[in-house]
Image (cartoon, rainbow, N blue to C red):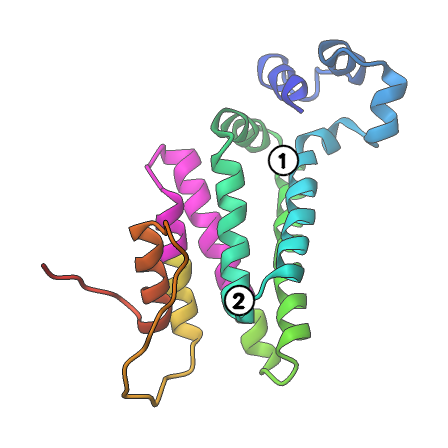
Amino acid sequence: MSAALELFESRGFDATTVDQIADRAGISRRTFFRQFRSKDDVVFVDHDVTLAAVRDSLARSELPPYDAVCDAAAQVYERFAGTPDTTRRRYRVVQAVPALRERELVMVLRYEQVFVGTLRDRTPDADPLITVQFAAAVTATHNYLLRRWLRDATAVSAADVRAALAAVRTRFAAPSSSTGPTVAILPPGVRPDDVTAVLTRHFGTVTTTE
């Protein structure tokens, strides 16, 4: 993928051949086509890996369903933010090629469909419209912040993303009738930003005072 993106950016997507990508990556043309149907597939190969990781994470998550979806979306951001050079290079390449932009929209829909499927399986009695709305809101929030980081070079931390997703979760949460104290048990070494995200998820905007 790295070899392909370098060539796409320097030579242009249409002008780059599969043979050139294979040569740059140090593999044969035959090996290339064992793994990819076309050069388009190379651009999104880590999306396929990430989507598989999301499915696995959701299947193993012990969080409540809506929280699990928010956590999975945050993990996607963390994976892409963890490879900033590659992620930004792909963004530039995709923006320059209409066919790749259309392919990216399909990929985004695949993430949303995984979220919807998880919620339908784990909350079968929930209003289907709410399920779809929540999955769409989580996906849109993630994508907005990711593109803001990519396009505007705005500093968006993983904690920012988790806080924004927690706010989405709060909008879809049923109001609590409990007036008693709430106890939150967190693992040792948890970061302050994560504590804030947990509190925000359950209580809305959290204001701290000294």
Give the answer, above or below, for where 125 lies relative to 114. Answer: below
| Disc 1: CA contacts within 10 A as few (<14), some (14-19) or many (>=20) | few
Q: Front-most of 190 and 155?
A: 190
Using the numbered discs, state the Cα–Cα distance from disc 2 to disc 1 in whole angstroms. Answer: 38 Å
Give the answer, above or below, for where 113 lies relative to 152. Answer: below
Amino acid type of disc 1? Answer: Pro
**Residue at x 64% of width, y 74% of height:** 122
Main structural element of the magenta stretch: helix, strand or loop?
helix
Question: Can you identify the residue that label 1 sits on?
Answer: 98
Q: Which residues are magenta?
A: 134-163
**Horizontal side of residue 44 vs 39, given as left or right:** left
| Disc 2: CA contacts within 10 A as few (<14), some (14-19) or many (>=20) | few
| Of the image marks 2 and 1, the number of the one nearer the N terminus | 2
Question: Can you identify the residue that label 2 sits on?
Answer: 63
**Horizontal side of residue 47 vs 26, given as left or right:** left
**Horizontal side of residue 203 vs 161, given as left or right:** left
**Residue at x 17% of width, y 61% of height:** 208
Query: In x, y percent, where is residue 52?
Result: 70, 48
Q: Residue furthest left?
A: 210
Residue 205 colored in magenta in the image: no
Query: In x, y percent, where is residue 31?
Result: 86, 21
Query: In x, y percent, where is residue 44?
Result: 67, 36
